[in-house]
Amino acid sequence: MTSHLVDTLRARRGDASRLFIETADGARITYAEADRRSAQYANALVALGLRPGDRLALQVEKSVEAVFAYLGTVRAGGVFLPLNTAYTPPEVAYFLGDAQAGVFVCDPASEAVLAPIARAEGVAQVVTLGADGQGTLRAAADASRTSFADVPRGPDDLAALLYTSGTTGRSKGAMLTHDNLASNALALVDTWRFTPDDVLIHALPIFHTHGLFVAINATLAAGSSMIFLPKFDPERVIALMGRASVLMGVPTFYVRLLKSPNLTPEASSHMRLFISGSAPLLAETHREWRMRTGHAILERYGMTETGMNTSNPYEGERLAGTVGFPLPGVSLRVMSPESGEALGAGEIGMIEVKGPNVFKGYWRMPEKTAAEFHDGWFVTGDLGLIGPDGYMQIVGRGKDLVISGGYNVYPKEIETEIDALPGVVESAVIGLAHPDFGEGVTAVVVARPDATLDEKAVIDALEGRLARYKCPKRVIFVDDLPRNTMGKVQKNLLREQYKGLYGS
Ligand code: MCA
Ligand code: AMP
């Protein structure tokens, strides 16, 4: 047995002298070089004590070295746990402790703050990797051998642990196996017709499924290449379209690109595919994009727990406002919340999914895992319908979740922090239509009559406790929150009342 994920990603790639990554400053890395560099990381990590099945947590800026650290971890048989760079030290402490990470990689600039926190959580090794690719982990890799015998790992062994927040407070670690990632990468390569000649503009962060697995694993599996940008910059992306073929983005990318007068049919004529996901793409954005560029954006639907589930067709109509059809090997059904029966075409219910892409469960949460499966199907928490033509539509969420610029924000987590502030009686956090982020995180707060709280005081108090993208963009003060007869806050009424807050 060898490493199932690594072997799958290598199987079709062909000539190792081909280009894998071109960086923003023009460095060119071939597949052969990536093999050597990831071998060096694997050797360095084994020397640090990383054993098969151990978790390696990493909170670093996007860099090519971070990609090698990901590949090196998997080759060493480890479990890769990437963390959003926006997470604050208290948030990081929770993940390190819950995952019982053996190694933590952080930015050299955060080491003084994060190393003691990591040690207090029982992490044995803390090493660094900076935005410039330098640090103690890089130095250890540089000094290591360039060949490595991949640690044998089977399809069902863990390759990654990705945390997704919960509607009930604690963040849950989704356990993703080698085959979850491998099967999904192959399904995407086939569905989106990736070939070795493709050039992907990679402008997403690499600590979530979208930028890490959808983008990087699909590139690896196809043996194609990517232009690796440190972050999303619309003008840079447009300038690169002339020598690229694919863009993957969240809807905010497309909204911002449309604002540039440089987005023209000529600028995008070399591109063959624009893919959107992580949050709903407005039908209006889809239409506008088609008018401006002549391309129909291909929208797809996924989750951390499942990777990608559905995609609009490569050939055939890419229908605005839909997420298309199940990927090869994946099954979806729409269930009635009342009867628990599968619903027919056009009826709205809870989306459930089954297939090799569906995760193994939540880390150390067997009960939570059992509660989110229904006869072997994973209950997504998304509400949808399958149209008569077979296209799936996501019509809402059964879970209390706000998606801001492609990042998930769980209101419960923000409400808990706001409710703990002096002078606050209670709060409700909602998502309101936002022209840039899709949804804007908004807090509705009931303050004590004698409190001197204002909007700025609430936002300032959350700084350092919550990642910035989770902080409310606006805070509204009210006397009471609307409740139903069961005493539950009626967020739908609040969403209706404040719907124009960020403009149309
Ligand atoms: C940045 N800010 C945000 C967001 N991003 N606020 C709300 N929502 C956001 N998404 C805030 C920062 O905290 C900061 O606030 C200010 O905006 C500027 O920060 P900056 O980093 O310069 O922002 P940006 O570069 O403009 O970022 C916007 C972005 C970025 C490019 C849309 O958020 C992004 O790359 N999003 C992609 C997320 C993603 O990859 N999601 C995939 C998850 P302040 O000034 O107050 O400090 S995977 C997934 O969902 C599933 C599996 C799937 O289907 O893909
Ligand atoms: P995450 O927990 O970050 O993996 O986010 C997964 C959630 O993002 C899904 O459960 C959906 O609610 C949402 N999502 C992803 N892609 C789409 C899409 N194309 N349209 C609507 N919602 C989406």
Image: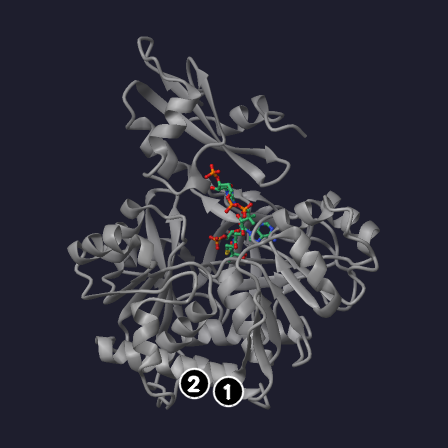
Looking at mark 1, is its residue's CB closer than 8 Å to ligand 1? Answer: no
Q: Position of residue 385 (x, y in %)?
A: 63, 50
Q: Nearer the viewer, residue 423 or 17?
A: 17
Q: Nearer the viewer, residue 323 or 17?
A: 17
Contact check, label 1 and label 2, Cβ < 8 Å: yes
Tell me what residue is drawn at x 37 percent, y 29 percent. 460
Tell me what residue is drawn at x 43 percent, y 85 percent. 36
Q: Vertical placement of 40 versus 298: above or below?
A: below
Which residue position holds label 1?
32
Q: Position of residue 105 (x, y in %)?
A: 31, 63
Q: Vertical placement of 210 versus 356: above or below?
A: above
Picture quarter with the C terminus: top right
Q: Vertical placement of 151 versus 465: above or below?
A: below
Tell me what residue is drawn at x 44 percent, y 31 percent. 429
- Dot 1, how many residues are within 10 Å of its Cα: few (below 14), some (14-19), or many (20+)? some
Amino acid type, mark 2: Arg
Q: Say which mark, if any, is on residue 36.
A: 2
Image position of 323 (left or right of 94): right
Residue found at the very far top of the displayed protein: 450
Q: Is residue 250 visible?
A: yes
Image position of 223 (left or right of 85): right
Image position of 177 (left or right of 268): left
SS at circle 1: helix
Q: Vertical placement of 332 versus 457: above or below?
A: below
Image quarter of residue 2: bottom left
Picture quarter with the N terminus: bottom left
Amino acid type, mark 1: Ala
Q: Position of residue 40 (x, y in %)?
A: 36, 82
